[in-house]
Amino acid sequence: MLTFTERAADALTTFHAAAARWDPDARLRLVRDGAGLRPEFADGLTDGDVEVAVGSISVWVPAGVEGRVDAGDHNVLTVSAG
């Protein structure tokens, strides 16, 4: 199971809102980046992605990513156990 802190949800919502100003259909995928996750723009699901609700938006995440997602300095997303 993947959970998001309020700070992580705010960071993703802000990132999504900025992208949606240019493309109202913008979607986000979180990709593994070392010990963390990095948001990228996506056109559709890839094999193994799952859709996860984060506040008022949905993001795609690779299957098997579990833990608690938080946002640190500069909204860098980190994943920790439970």
Image (tube, grey):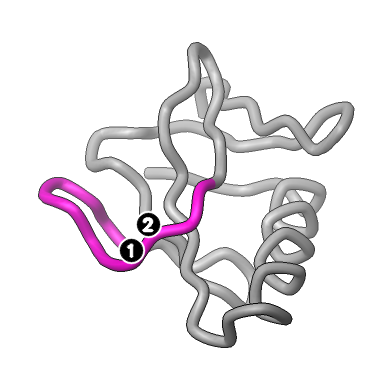
What is the CA distance from the residue labelled 1 to the residue labelled 2? 5 Å
Mark 1 or mark 2, earlier in chain: 1
- Local crowd at mark 2 within 10 Å, few (<14), some, or many (≥20)? many
Residue underneath mark 2? 60
Region of the chain picked out in magenta, as a range: 40-51
Q: Residues within 10 Å of mark 1 (few under 14, many from 20)?
A: few
Residue 17 drawn at (x, y percent): 73, 73
| Amino acid at circle 2 | Trp
The residue that mark 1 highlights is: 51
Question: Which percent across, then down, holds residue 33?
Answer: 49, 21
Most distant residue in the bottom direction: 24
SS class of the residue under badge 2?
Answer: strand
Q: In terms of secondary structure, where does tag 1 sit?
A: strand
Q: Which residue sits furthest top?
A: 34
Residue type, label 1: Glu
**Magenta stretch: residue 44 in it?**
yes
Q: Quadrant of residue 57?
A: bottom right
- Tag shown at residue 42: none
Q: Quadrant of residue 38?
A: top right
